[in-house]
Each structure stands twice: as structure tokens, then as C-alpha cells.
Image: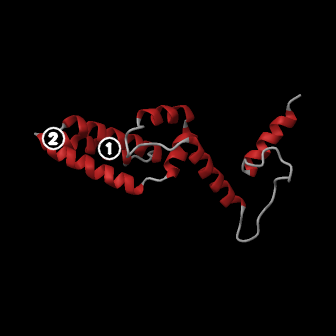
């Protein structure tokens, strides 16, 4: 009976994650769900499964997970950040880390090989913002009448 109760959240998670429309945000939510359900069961096997899941999640999780969550819904990101502040597995980095990761992604997209593509003027007021974002901001500010 306990084994069935312990494996029920895992079965539900398996069904959710195997759906065609599942993505990394779905996976993140599903893993949080599994762990919370297993913690509530409070049996030795459930605790061992939680520990194993947390260890594996921590090994595979990167700042790019946080970038994806932030880009998907910044307000939800802030809620999750405060909710999981003491949870080592699902703790989310500050916005500065996310901005740096996004900037690195944009720079990687703009620089091909050793030839740097320069699109930002020297006296650009948005010089600390990646060029793709800078152009958008610049075009918005010039279109305002």
C-alpha cells in the first residue's frame, strides 16, 4: 500500500512528461510537484526517492533553467524565487545572473568565429545592453513623437 502511494506521483509525472506538448517549464513544475508529494508521504522510501531526485536535479540544473523561467513569466519567476529561497534544489539566481546569461547568449549569436560583428556605436547610451536589445530600445525611443 505504501509503495503504491509513493509511486503514484511518479506515475503522474511520467504521464505529464511524456506528452508531446511537454517542455522544460512543464518538467520544472512536474519535478517540484513530485518532490512536494513525496515529502508529504513521509516514509523512508519516499525520503530516499526525494534525496535521489534532488541530487540528480542539482547535477543537471544550470542558470539557463532560470533564464527560461524568467523569460516565460518574470512575475512568476519572482514568486518562485521567494518561495524556493531556502530550497537548494529549486533556488533561483538573482536577475543579474539571468541578465548576464542572456547577454552571453546574445553575444554568442552575434559573434561568428574570430570575426566580431559590431553593430553598437561607440557613444551608445545602451552600451551595456546586448546589441539586438539595444536596437529595439533605440527604435522605440526614436519612434516616440
| Residue annotated with mark 2 | 43
Q: Residue at x 40, y 43 (%)?
A: 90
Q: Residue furthest top?
A: 145
Q: Is residue 55 above or below residue 116?
A: above
Instruction: State the residue lying farthest toward the right.
Output: 145
Q: Which residue is mark 1?
A: 13
Left-right relation of 108 to 141 = left
Residue at screen point 30% across, 41% down: 34
Q: Is residue 8 above or below residue 100?
A: above
Q: Please tell me whether mark 2 sits on a helix, a strand or a loop.
A: loop
Displayed quadrant of residue 83: top left
Instruction: Say which quadrant the N terminus sits in.
Output: top left
Kindly identify the residue that appears in the image at 78 percent across and 49 percent down.
Answer: 127
User: For residue 60, what is the image quadrant?
Assistant: bottom left
Q: Which mark is residue 51?
A: none
Q: Position of residue 85 (x, y in %)?
A: 42, 37
Residue furthest toward the bottom? 114
Mark 2 vs mark 1, CA separation in Å: 19 Å
Q: Is residue 97 left or right of residue 81?
A: right
Q: x%, y% of residue 45?
A: 16, 47
Within 10 angstroms of label 1, few (less than 14), some, or many (20 or more) residues? Answer: some
The one nearer the camera, 14 or 95, is 95
Q: Position of residue 104 (x, y in %)?
A: 63, 56
The secondary structure type at the circle numbered 1 is: helix
Is residue 80 found left or right of 135 in the rendered image? left
Q: How many marks?
A: 2
Q: Check the picture and name the quadrant holding the C terminus.
A: top right
**Residue 69: image x %, image y %?**
51, 42
Q: Nearer the viewer, residue 46 or 128?
A: 128
Amino acid at each position: 500500500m505504501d509503495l503504491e502511494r509513493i509511486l503514484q506521483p511518479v506515475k503522474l509525472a511520467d504521464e505529464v512528461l511524456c506528452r508531446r506538448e511537454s517542455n522544460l517549464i512543464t518538467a520544472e513544475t512536474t519535478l517540484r510537484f513530485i518532490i512536494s508529494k513525496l515529502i508529504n508521504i513521509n516514509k523512508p522510501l519516499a525520503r530516499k526517492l526525494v534525496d535521489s531526485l534532488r541530487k540528480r536535479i542539482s547535477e543537471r540544473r544550470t542558470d539557463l533553467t532560470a533564464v527560461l523561467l524568467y523569460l516565460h513569466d518574470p512575475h512568476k519567476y519572482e514568486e518562485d524565487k521567494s518561495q524556493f529561497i531556502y530550497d537548494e534544489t529549486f533556488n533561483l539566481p538573482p536577475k543579474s545572473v539571468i541578465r548576464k546569461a542572456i547577454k552571453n547568449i546574445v553575444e554568442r549569436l552575434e559573434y561568428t568565429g574570430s570575426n566580431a560583428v559590431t553593430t553598437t556605436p561607440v557613444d551608445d547610451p545602451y552600451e551595456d545592453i546586448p546589441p539586438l536589445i539595444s536596437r529595439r530600445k533605440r527604435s522605440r525611443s526614436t519612434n516616440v513623437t
